Image (cartoon, helix red, strand yellow):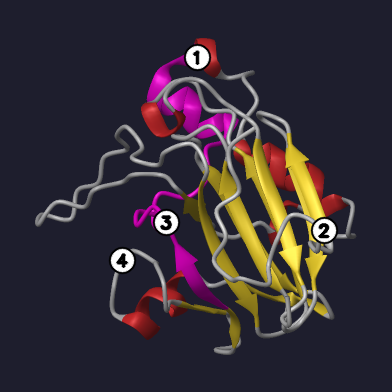
C-alpha cells in the first residue's frame, strides 16, 4: 500500500467517511454528497481511471466534456477545474492534483473500438464501456446513459494538428486527484482493463477511492 499523502492537516485515513479499493479491471460506483471531498488515487501508478459523474438526484444531468473544456478553455483538467454538467452547472471542483495529466477527449475503450484498432482477436476482451454499462445498470440506467468520460491519469498528448496519441502514463504510485462535490453526485468508475495500448502500462492495477466530509 502506498503512503497516504495528506492535503489537509485535518484529513486522514481515520476520518474518511468512505474508503474503497477497486480491483484491477473492475467497475465501481458510489454517491458523494454536496460539500464532501472525493479523492481518486492511482495506487500503483500508470493506471487509467475512466470516470463519469451524474447528478445523484436526476441522472439525466451528467458530466459534459464539451461544457467542461469550453468553460476552462483547455483540453486538460487540473487543480481549479470546474467539472460542468450538460445543464451548465458545476458538479465538482478539482482542488488538488499531484499528477497534472488527465485526458478528457479519448473516451472509453469498448469491444467495438478494440476490434477496429487492434484486430478481431481483441473483440471479446473486457473494456471500459462494458464496465460502465454494467455499473450504471445498477442505478436503473442503460448504455444510452454512458457519455464521453474523463480519463484520470491517462496521458494523451494533442499535437498542433489536432492528432492525439495514447502514450505511457506519467503518474507515480500514490498520485491522486481531489474534487469537492458542488452537488450530490453519483461517481461511476471503470478501472481500465485495456492491455492493447500503454494507457495503463499494459498492466491493469487496483486503485483507491476515498471521501471526506468538508470539515475534515
Q: Mark 4 = which residue?
A: 75
Residue 20 appears left or right of 42: right
Q: CA distance from mark 4 to mark 3?
A: 18 Å
Q: Which residue is mark 2?
A: 18
Query: Which quadrant of the figure has residue 144?
Result: bottom right
Residue at 54% across, 66% down:
7
Q: Earlier in the sequence, mark 2 or mark 3?
A: 2
Q: Is residue 7 magenta?
A: no
Question: Could you tell which of marks 1 and 2 lies nearer the N-terminus?
Answer: 2
The residues colored magenta run 93-120
Q: Nearer the viewer, mark 4 or mark 1?
A: 4
10 Å neighbourhood of mark 4: few (<14), some, or many (≥20)?
some
Instruction: Select label 4 or label 3 by which is in front.
Output: 3
Q: Residues within 10 Å of mark 2 (few under 14, many from 20)?
A: some
Q: Which residue is mark 3?
A: 98
Judged left or right of residue 159, residue 80 is right
Asked if marks 1 and 2 touch (Cβ < 8 Å), the reply is: no
How far is disc 1 from disc 2 in space, using C-alphas?
40 Å
Q: Secondary structure at mark 1?
A: helix
Placement of the C terminus among the 4 image quadrants: bottom right
Amino acid at each position: 500500500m502506498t503512503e497516504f499523502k495528506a492535503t489537509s492537516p485535518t484529513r486522514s485515513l481515520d476520518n474518511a467517511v468512505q474508503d474503497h479499493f477497486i480491483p484491477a479491471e473492475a467497475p465501481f460506483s458510489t454517491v458523494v454528497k454536496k460539500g464532501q471531498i472525493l479523492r481518486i488515487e492511482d495506487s500503483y501508478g500508470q493506471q487509467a481511471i475512466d470516470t463519469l459523474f451524474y447528478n445523484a438526484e436526476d441522472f439525466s444531468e451528467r458530466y459534459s466534456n464539451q461544457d467542461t473544456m469550453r468553460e476552462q478553455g483547455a483540453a486538460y483538467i487540473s487543480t481549479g477545474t470546474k467539472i460542468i454538467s450538460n445543464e451548465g452547472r458545476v458538479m465538482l471542483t478539482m482542488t488538488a492534483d499531484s499528477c497534472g495529466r488527465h485526458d478528457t477527449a479519448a473516451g472509453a475503450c469498448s469491444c467495438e473500438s478494440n476490434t477496429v484498432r487492434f484486430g478481431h482477436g481483441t473483440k471479446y476482451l473486457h473494456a471500459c464501456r462494458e464496465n460502465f454499462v454494467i455499473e450504471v445498470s445498477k442505478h436503473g440506467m442503460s448504455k444510452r446513459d454512458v457519455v464521453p468520460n474523463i480519463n484520470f491519469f491517462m496521458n494523451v498528448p494533442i499535437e498542433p494538428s489536432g492528432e492525439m496519441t495514447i502514450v505511457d502514463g506519467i503518474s507515480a504510485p500514490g498520485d491522486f486527484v481531489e474534487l469537492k462535490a458542488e452537488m450530490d453526485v453519483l461517481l461511476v468508475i471503470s478501472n481500465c482493463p485495456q492491455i492493447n495500448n500503454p494507457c495503463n502500462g499494459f498492466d491493469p492495477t487496483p486503485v483507491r477511492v476515498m471521501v471526506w466530509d468538508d470539515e475534515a
